[in-house]
Image: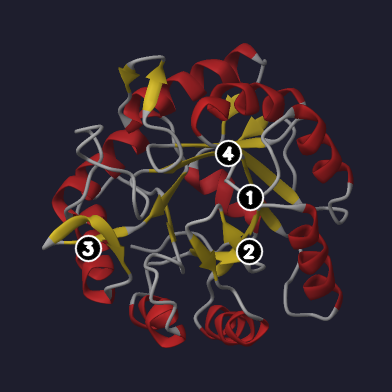
Amino acid sequence: MIDKEKTIISCAVTGAVAPKSVNPHVPVTPEEIAACVYDVWKAGAAIVHLHMRKQDDIEIGTMDAELFKETIRLIRNYKDCDIIINCTSSGDLSYEDEIRYKPFTMIPEIEIGSYDIGTFNWNDMFVFYNTPEFLHKLHAVYDEYDVKPEVEIFSYNMLKNAEMYLNNGRLKEPLFCQFMLGVGGMMEANVENLFYLVNHLPKGSIWSCSGIGTAHVPMMYAALAMGGNIRVGLEDNLYYSRGVVASNTMLVERAVRLVKEFGKRPATPAETRKMLGIKPLVR
């Protein structure tokens, strides 16, 4: 259900590779991530997007289910924090199917899971594998464990994949689409591309956008101007402005100010659950 008066703010707090050596505010341990999540919730984020890092090499992402479990336990230890838990399904580069979906079978507190709906070359660095076989398995897990797919879209062909999966019943309405623009090798982060994607969304879809790096602020303005929702966080952008490192809280606080400047207000986690068709949080 789309609510034109409210804007969902998501915060991707760490990512798989955002370097703490460049920005010391990047949280990498369960304790750091949980404390950061509590802070961004207080600042106005309704959803937190989680990655984990190897504890013996914090610059490398991992899908270690026990790290997800411990981090989410620490988040929920903040008794008043009702933020929506959204976990990645692509947190390391091994791309072993079972490892990627295991956390969702073990942790009932996970409410949303990323659903990267296509394979592509990420610059010249690696192939981002999301095969039909894996997506079918992941869909089955999400369906069994009542996890809402966050359909991450990096290009128009991925949007067409989402439409196909909606038509064949693998995805259900309302789609929750996260446009990730500015990733090397995929659609550039500009207003023209965002406008094109939004205009080709299946009817009734709820969408959000993030611009990578220097595109972060321009795409946030564009998304708000088009009536969309926004994602911020150190996974996508390490800087607040040129040469000034950001914290996740700083990025959420700026997003809240901009939402209000546009005459809207940030959606609460409870309101966001209702908009996305997610069950109310039960303590």
**71 vs 79: above or below:** below
The dot on residue 185 is 1
Mark 4 and mark 3 residues within 8 Å of each other at the beta carbon: no
Task: First in sequence, mark 1 or 2: give its number.
Answer: 2
Q: Which residue is mark 4?
A: 8
**Residue at the (43%, 33%) spot, across then down:** 237
Mark toward the viewer: 2 or 4: 2
Mark toward the viewer: 4 or 1: 1
Amino acid beneath label 3: Arg
Q: Which residue is mark 2?
A: 120
Amino acid beneath label 1: Gly
Q: CA distance from mark 2 to mark 4?
A: 28 Å
Q: Residue furthest front?
A: 124
Mark 1 and mark 2 residues within 8 Å of each other at the beta carbon: yes
Q: Position of residue 1 (x, y in %)?
A: 74, 50
Q: Quadrant of residue 277?
A: bottom right
Task: First in sequence, mark 2 or 3: give its number.
Answer: 3
Amino acid beneath label 2: Phe
Q: CA distance from mark 4 to mark 1?
A: 28 Å
The dot on residue 73 is 3
- The answer to whether residue 275 is left or right of residue 113 is right
Mark toward the viewer: 3 or 1: 1
